[in-house]
Image: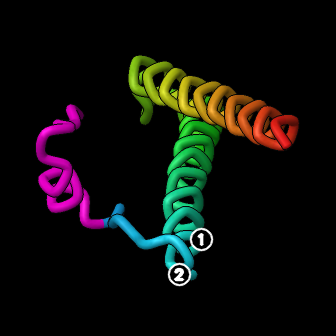
Amino acid sequence: MTVSFHNPAAFFTQNPDIAPVRLGETNVVESFGKVLSKALGEVNSLQNQSDKMVQMMITHPDKVNIHDVTTLMSQAEMSLSMTKVVTDRVINAYREITNLR
């Protein structure tokens, strides 16, 4: 996804889940919470799908393609590691902000 800084309105029309809000409104917290909750839900869903595929591979190896299992496991692992990296960066940014005062 590319973001054009010359036309930021186009970004928000293409992504209706992310909407600009004004400071001082409660929507800032709610929209951030929704985005965070949605992202964590997707990571959790990938992890659950991966676990189910591995269990299916163990119990019924003829019904599961091994390439699909490894692909799904890789996707789940990558999404979890990206979540950890983002979480670490958010925590570091918060610490830097609190150290500025």
48 horizontally vs 21: left or right? right
Most distant residue in the front direction:
101
- The residue shown at (12%, 53%) is 10
Q: CA distance from mark 2 to mark 1?
A: 8 Å
Callout 2 amino acid: Glu
Q: Quadrant of the N terminus?
A: top left
Question: What colour scheme does the image use?
Answer: rainbow
Q: Which residues are magenta?
A: 1-16
> Left or right: 70 with respect to 65?
right
- Give me the residue at 77% from left, 31% from top: 92
Image quadrant holding the C terminus, namely: top right
Q: Which residue is mark 1?
A: 29
Residue 91 in magenta stretch: no
Q: Amino acid at mark 1?
A: Val
Q: Quadrant of residue 15?
A: bottom left
Q: Residue 19, position in %: x, y? A: 33, 66
